[in-house]
Each structure stands twice: as C-alpha cells, then as structure tokens.
Amino acid sequence: MQSDDQPLRSALQAGERSYGHGTRLGGADFSYQVQSWRVDRAYTTDLPAAMRAFTGSSAAQLDLELTGAYGVAAPALYSPWAPRESGDAARPGQSVVQTTSLNTGRQLPVFRGTVRSRSADSGTDTVQITALDGAERLRGPAALPRPYAGFVAQRPIASATWCVDELLRQAGILTCPPVREGRDTGPITGNALTLVHASLHGGFAAAYGTPLTLPDQTQYTWSRAAAPYEMAVLPNKPGLTMAWAPRSRLVAPGGSILLEASVNTLKAAPGGRMLYLKAVLDRQGTDFGSVQMSFDATTGTVAAWSGTYGKSGGVSASWSFPQLVAQPGVWHLGAIVDTEWAVVGSVYDGSGEWVSNPVTVFPVLRGPDGVVLIGGGSQLGSSAADNQPDAELHRVEVVTDFATECVQVSQGYTADYHGDDFELDWTKGATLDDVTLPLYSIPAVSGSQWDVIGQIAAAALGTAEFDESGIFRWRNHTRFLAPPTHAQRTVTSVGDIASLTVAEEIDACRNYCVQPYQDWSQVSYQTATVLADPLVRAIASGQTYTVSYPFDEQEYDVLAPLVDDDTTPVTDGTTVLRFAATNAANAAPVKGRVETEIDRSNGSLTLTMRSWARSNAVYTVAKAGAGSINLVTRKPVNDPVVRQAVGLDPDPNKYSEHTYGRQQYTAQASDWVQDAAAAQSLADTLVRAGRYPVPLYSNVEVLYDPRLQLGDVIELVDYSGAYLDQLAWVVGNTVEAANDGTVKQTLTLRGASYNGGPASSSLAPESPADPALRRDRTYAQLGTRFAGYRDLTGVGGNYRDLWSR
C-alpha cells in the first residue's frame, strides 16, 4: 500500500469522491489535455480461482485520451506524421507518468512507463495513447549463464531469485552497482573490461565470469536484512571462500585490475572481522602466484601480499585506516593490482619480452560517510626474487567473514587511478525477496526476459510486477503459508462499496497437492569437447585475433582458455590453449603473452586472443604441430530424476478431506524446481492455501483509494447484503477517470481466509448413494419375481444388475 499524508487520509475518511490528476509525456505536463484515462493491473495467475494464493506476473497498461491545444486539433499535434516538435511527446517509447490525488494532499503515482502505441482519429480532436509499464523494458532476448559447477559439486549454484535479478540487470533494472564494462579508464588503457561480476543475490553464478569454488550450504545464508544494497551472502563461520574464473585471462606482467566488493561490517560471522580479495595467477609449472589485499575491521589495517599461493614468504605492505573501525556499516572495499607499472625490478629475456615484474598495489575504500579513501601505491618487491613471473589470471578468490555483495573485477584500472568513479552512479530499480528455489543447474531459456520472469514466477508461486513508481517487485510464496492477520485498508458497504458479488465453489478446494521437482543428486557428469579447431592461427605482436563458432544454447559454459606449458595436464573440464613463438612441432610453449577471452551470445561462442608480446608473433600450435584450440566443458551424463513432493492437510483430524473429499491438485512440472525441501515447501503452501474453498469476490466497485496496490490485503465489511467481514488479497485493480472529476475503481479480490468448516447442526447431509436401494432388494422379492436361477438368467440379467432394476 502506498504511503499517504494527513490531508489525503482525512479526505479518504470523509468519503471524498472527486479527484485531481497529473499526466506527463516526455517530462512535459499534459494534464489539461487529458479527456479520460484508465489503468489496468492484474496478476496472470494459473492457480485455481478460489485458492487462498495467487502467482504470476503483472504488466500494467495506461490508456489516455488526449485533446488538442492552442486551437490545434490533437491529430495535427500528436499523430505519427505530426511535426516532430509536438508529435514526439506521444511517440512509441516516450516516457509516461500518471499521478492522482483526491483534490487534496500529496499526489500519488498511478503509473510509470512508456508509450506503446498511438492512434489519431483524423477529423476529430482525439488521440488515443496506450502505454505499458516497466515490463516493456524486458522485451529483450532472455539469456542466462549455464555454469556446470553446481551439479559437479552437488551444491546450489544459483536460485530462481538470482535468475530474476540477472534478467533485470540485462535490461538496466539494477539492485546493486552495475558492471564497469565500457567505462573510460584513461587514454592508455581505454575502456574497462569486466572480468567478474557476481551480485551474490541468491547465487554464486555470475553475469561475467564463471563460479569455480562453491561453499557448502551449511556455511552461509542469503540475507536481505544484512545486505549493503539488496541481498548478500552471510557467512555462518569465518573464512567463507568463493572463487570465479574470469571472463578473460589477464596476462602478467602487463595487465592491471580493480578488485572490489561491498560488505556490511555490522553483520559478520561470530569471531570474524576480515575480508580477502585475491588474484590467483597461473604460472608455468605446478605453482600458482597470488596477489591479495586483506581488510581488518578490528584494527583498521589493510595489507597487501604478493608471492606463491599457499606458501610462506612473499612481499607485503600495509596501510592504516582507522575509519574502518570507527565507522561500522556498509563499506565498499577495493584493490588496484597493476602488474605492468614498476620503478625497478623488471626482468626481460633476450628478445625484450617480459620474464617477470614486481606488482604495484594500493587499496581503495568508501565508508558509510561517503568519503573515498585511497592508500599510497606500493611496489611489492624490488628484485627478481620478489617478482611475479609470466602468468595468466587463473581465478579470483574472495574469503569473507562479512555479509558480502557485488564482487566485481575490472581490467583497465592502473596504478594512476584516483578513485574518481569508485562509487558508480546508479539508480536502484527493483526489490527482491528471500531465496526459495535453489538451482543446481540453471535451465536453458528462450523468449523475452519478461516471458522467462513470468515462467519463474509461476514455478515459484511468486509474483512479479512493476509498482506505480516504476519499481520492480519480486515476492515469493511464503506469504501464503498462513492467512494474513491484518488489513491495510477496510472497505464497507456503508461508505465504500458500490457493488459486490460473492461466490464459493468446491472446485477450488485442494487438500492433496503434488509438486514435481528434478532430483539432481544422482546426476553424474563428463568432460565434453565442444569444438576442436585444427587450424594453427598466427597472432601478431600487439594484435587481437577473434574467431567465432556456432554454439547451442543447451550447452554448458566454456571457460576462458588457460595457457598450456606442457608441464601439468588439465583434467577438470577447463579449456586449454597452447602458444609457441614458432609454428612448428615441439616448439617451446610461451606463457604470459596472450590474453584469452570467451564470450557466449547470440548462438555463438567467440574466442578472442590478444597478444601482449612486444616484438614476436605467437601461434596456436600444439606440441604435435596441429592447432591447439580445443574448447571443452562439462555436461551431465544422465537426466535428473523427476520426483514428487506431496502436501497433505496439516489438520490431524483431516476435516477438509472428511467434509469435501480428497481433492487433488498437481502443479506443473518445471525445470526451476530442483530441490526436495523447496518442492515440499511449495506443496505445503498449496495445500494450506487450498484445503478450504475461499470466497470469490467479483465486480467489487469501491470508493477510489489511490493508495491500493496489487498484493495488498483489505478487509471487506458488508452487513447489509452478503453479510461478511473478511480479509482479501487485491489481485486486480482497474481505475477509470474522466476530466469532469469522476473516478471509478474496480477491484478483483481473492479471499484470504475461509468461513470455517460446515457447522449445520440442524441439517443431516445425505450419503452419496441411496441406502434405501439396497434395503428394497430382498430375497423374498426375488423369489416372487423369479422362481429360480434359471428364470433369472433367462431374462438376460445377472445378480449384480438387480441393484439397478
């Protein structure tokens, strides 16, 4: 329910029946030209009509009727061929905002969206405009990543909530800071390239990058209350570890990145106060390099370290930020890692190619007060022994004790970064709900983003809609586990209700509910070759080589290729390329000279190879002399087993079943339900919502209340007609208004509770079959009609048929 002020509240209580409105097209006020307007909102639920629950998506529509101005007819001003200066106000795609009030108090939003169509009646003074809300922004093609780490590790990798959030992000509807992709990072580095962007909004899957390390479900919870922005992963004990493979394998020496995450230092695992951001480098041989930045909220110490992953030694530096202790709350923490810039210590081979280089790092922080803090740059080491040798970025690790959200790694931010855009400019456009459907494998999707969100809402018993202010709202099924106990608004037949029809039907009674789900616990996997390219390709010094291959949307993701050095065989489903300085068999492999990137979009898989070599070309040649491009992934060997969760009436006396009989409902099978506990929760919700038929309310015309929204609970009081005093959900809301000040509001309601069980003490319900029928057929009667069995069979009947004679 929308918030109000005292004048509006008083007008509602007084029964005010006239209204005022505001209409803006393209930001300009057209209120005085509006003859009439109408807004329709309703859930497209597929549950039985009288269940105490609803689901689905809602796209609101606004219909406007405009007249002309300044003595010029509306078609001449706003038709498709009208002059652009005036006609663009009504063009398809133009912004529309509708507000209203009761001629007093604050103006409340009614609709925010864009023009979908316009129709001008030539020879009249009327132009009809139809607009849709934010759902129109979600008409782009749906695309979701398909990482394989979930079913490989037998741990959830995402959730239905994460998938909804990702589809919104693709349309520019944000719940946390956006990707830095394409941002200008300076004349030398150009635009930023996003290597990892993991929102952590109900999943470890990432918009960019691919999850590698998934923590066990017992080690964390998804929390909205603790989140810096919308939702965060909250560790149950210190040291929660997550890791992602980057979208592009940054080379070292040469590349530079900004690692960042947002945390809430007020919400941490018991005894934990640390965050680690790590860049792990794939060196030649079996060792990995590591460059990390740690943040200690107990002491205010921020420390950097460079060395060999998992081993002692290395080089370190530290900074002191007492604000990290003095200002607990939401902190945006980052680290610049520059493997190119160095004052001393660089090592080159005879051809001038880098062999190793020191790493320059410094921290960037922004606290609750909004001030950006930057530590002085520190070169970690000054001799060859301290350097990071030729390598590529293997993975990014985050080890956290705090509620953590929005992990991002961006290439192109160097040691001369001043933190100007550390806090990105963005507007929050959506709210989510608690995670209810964990996913071990993200289903393949097709259609528009809005289509897929609607499918997810139906499977999750959730609702998806844009509210009157243009904010997207996702709500799960848990609100239907128990009937609501209070209303946000009371409407009565005395002063609010103009018409009301109440009905009840047994078809909506469901006391035996079945929820199918996919069981991924017995799914095994295998490494699969997606494509083997036999060609050897030459990449000139400093040049970029791109090659695309057809790619089925059913395939699982291919990681950005690692660079082979002939020393460690890779068997974990990771794509590996081999580069050499000459196109010949047995040519020595090279490391740290080619950056490899994978992009999956529009039915293609695109491999990009960027050479950082200073003078020589490199070749994609295998040790045997053939082409080394061999793209692989992992995929399931077998399909998940489809099982069923059954929801039974929780009443031990089974009153519903005794009264109405067993009434079965089977939810539609869906790829989005992959967890037994989640399926059971859905089944239990269905049976609790459906075990008694609730009343259907139609044609509920009420005194206009601009505060009412979809999903609100109102109390219906009617002692003059239907005799009821019950709570109901608002599942449809239509408002029609004219320029003479009249307004009509019609609600579609779904009962939120039932009127108890039958208690007709003066009635004696009769049995389904007539008991007198059996008593009327006696052996004495048979004897008088049929002398013997021969006579009985002679008429073509049998003993069983006598009960119907």
Image (spheres, rainbow, N blue to C red):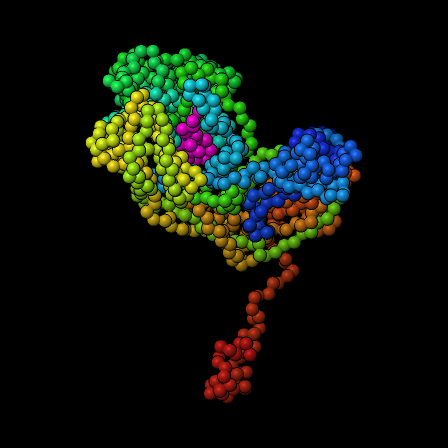
* Residue at figure coordinates x 36%, y 41% from the top left: 151
Q: Quadrant of residue 745?
A: top right
Query: For residue 731, which quarter of the picture?
Result: top right
Q: Position of residue 186 (x, y in %)?
A: 45, 19
Within the magenta stretch, is there residue 211?
yes
Depicted 86 relative to depicted 524: above or below: above
Question: Is any part of residue 59 visible from this angle?
Answer: yes
For the C terminus, the image quarter is bottom right
Magenta run includes residue 583: no
Closer to us: 388 or 11: 388
Residue at image position (48%, 85%) is 793
Rendered location of residue 204, percent (x, y): 41, 34
Image: 449 above or below 541: below
Residue at the image point whose x is 36% and y is 26% from the top: 543
What is the span of residues highlighted in magenta in the rendered image?
A: 192-214
Q: Is residue 93 found left or right of 321 in the rendered image?
A: right
